[in-house]
Image (cartoon, rainbow, N blue to C red):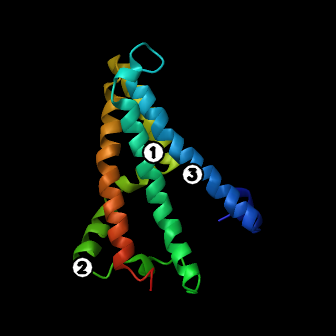
């Protein structure tokens, strides 16, 4: 879609949608990098000798890949002259019962939401407060590790969900 102001005004344009996507990809790709730098103790000496900047960069790649999966669905449909995909829950519902059960369980523990800019920023804020309380970077580092682990789970689950749903049919 075209951004908040356009949604409020009920206007849309190709440039607006494109600009909105550029903004989301940029913000959501840079936040994990910033978290990795914070976990490394940037700008203090020795920050580059730690694995944290690399882990932050890897999370960034996972976030961007996960976002791209959604766009790949729309591109694939357009390339094959399929109609525009409607945003309905039943379209995204996996056909396999195990995936359906796992997807419904994710509603109760929506870790996949952590990779959106607002939620990720709030998690970073909570981690920073935790770091201030503990006097070190342990809470931020725990967040970075959790984001890396759950990022892999999110991508695998998202890909399986797309392939087993009716989105590409």
Which image quarter is the N terminus in? Answer: bottom right
Cα gap from disc 1 to disc 2, whole angstroms: 31 Å
Q: Tell me the element at label 2.
A: helix
Cα gap from disc 3 to disc 2, whole angstroms: 32 Å
Q: Tell me the element at label 3.
A: helix
User: Number of labelled discs?
Assistant: 3
Q: Earlier in the sequence, mark 1 or mark 2?
A: 1
Q: Position of residue 126 (x, y in %)?
A: 42, 34
Residue 65 or 122: which is nearer the viewer? 65
Q: Position of residue 63 (x, y in %)?
A: 45, 51
Q: Residues within 10 Å of mark 1 (few under 14, many from 20)?
A: many
Q: Say which of marks 1 and 2 sits in front.
A: 1
Q: Can residue 109 be seen in this snapshot? A: no
Vertical arrangement, residue 41 with respect to residue 79, above or below: above
Residue under label 3:
25
Q: Name the residue located 45 percent from the left edge and 35 percent from the top edge.
A: 124
Vertical arrangement, residue 31 with respect to residue 96, above or below: above
Q: Position of residue 125 (x, y in %)?
A: 46, 33
Vertical arrangement, residue 2 with respect to residue 111, above or below: below
Residue under label 1:
60
Cα gap from disc 1 to disc 3, whole angstroms: 10 Å
Q: Residues within 10 Å of mark 3 (few under 14, many from 20)?
A: some
Q: Say which of marks 3 and 2 sits in front.
A: 3
Q: Are marks 3 and 2 in contact (CB under 8 Å)?
A: no
Q: Give the farthest residue toward the top.
A: 45
Q: Residues within 10 Å of mark 2 (few under 14, many from 20)?
A: few
Q: Name the residue located 38 percent from the left edge and 55 percent from the top edge.
A: 112
Which image quarter is the C terminus in? Answer: bottom left
Q: Name the residue located 32 percent from the left edge and 20 percent from the top edge.
A: 134
Q: Name the residue located 59 percent from the left edge and 52 percent from the top edge.
A: 24
Residue under label 2:
97
Q: Tell me the element at label 1.
A: helix
């Amino acid at each position: 879609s075209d951004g908040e102001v356009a949604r409020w005004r009920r206007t849309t344009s190709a440039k607006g949608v494109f600009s909105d996507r550029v903004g989301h990809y940029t913000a959501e790709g840079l936040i994990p990098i910033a978290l990795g730098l914070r976990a490394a103790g940037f700008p203090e000496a020795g920050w580059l000798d730690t694995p944290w900047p690399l882990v932050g960069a890897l999370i960034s790649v996972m976030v961007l890949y996960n976002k791209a999966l959604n766009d790949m669905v729309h591109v694939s449909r357009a390339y094959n002259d399929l109609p525009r995909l409607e945003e309905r829950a039943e379209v995204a519902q996996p056909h396999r019962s195990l995936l359906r059960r796992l997807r419904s369980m994710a509603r109760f523990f929506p870790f996949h939401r952590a990779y959106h800019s607002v939620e990720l920023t709030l998690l970073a804020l909570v981690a920073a407060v935790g770091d201030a309380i503990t006097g070190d970077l342990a809470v931020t580092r725990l967040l970075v590790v959790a984001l890396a682990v759950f990022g892999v789970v999110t991508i695998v689950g998202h890909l399986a969900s797309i392939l087993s749903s009716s989105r590409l049919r």
